[in-house]
């Protein structure tokens, strides 16, 4: 089963003939998966990774609640 490449959430079925299939459930997930390059790319601190994990968890929860 394929899911969002950003958070792993199940993706809606791609429309036939719609071109390239979706890889992310939301543009935000794509940005999370591919953060802007440049700047401090030397590494990520544990605190930053923990914060990001919480943001992803919160995003998934809110999306499920909305059920849109
Ligand atoms: Zn996602």
Image: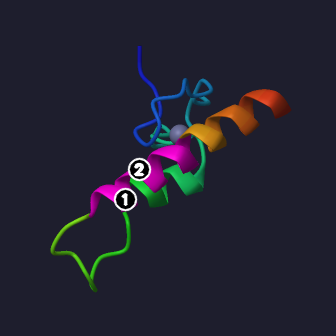
The residue carrying mark 1 is 47
Q: In which quarter of the image is the N terminus?
A: top left
- Residue depicted at x 47% and y 55%: 51
Q: In which quarter of the image is the C terminus?
A: top right
Vertical relation: 22 (above or below) 38: above
The residue carrying mark 2 is 50
- Residue depicted at x 56% and y 28%: 11
Q: How many labels does the image show?
A: 2
Image side of residue 56 versus residue 64, left or right: left
- Residue depicted at x 64% and y 43%: 59
Mark 2 touches mark 1? (CB < 8 Å): yes
Q: What element carries label 1?
A: helix
Vertical relation: 46 (above or below) 7: below
Q: Position of residue 43 (x, y in %)?
A: 19, 68
Could you classify mark 1 by the number of other residues whose Cα lies within 10 Å: few (under 14), some (14-19), or many (20 or more)?
Answer: few
Q: Quadrant of residue 64?
A: top right
Q: Quadrant of residue 5?
A: top left
Image side of residue 53 versus residue 16, left or right: left
The answer for how far apart the CA atoms under marks 2 and 1 are is: 5 Å
Q: Which region of the structure is painted magenta?
A: 45-56
* Marking on residue 33: none
Q: Which of 22 and 68 is in front in this view?
A: 68
């Amino acid at each position: 089963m394929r899911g969002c490449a950003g958070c792993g959430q199940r993706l809606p079925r791609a429309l036939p003939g719609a071109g390239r299939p979706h890889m992310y459930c939301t543009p935000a997930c794509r940005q999370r998966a591919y953060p802007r390059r440049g700047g401090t790319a030397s590494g990520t601190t544990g605190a930053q990774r923990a914060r990001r994990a919480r943001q992803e968890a919160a995003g998934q929860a809110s999306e499920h609640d909305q059920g849109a």
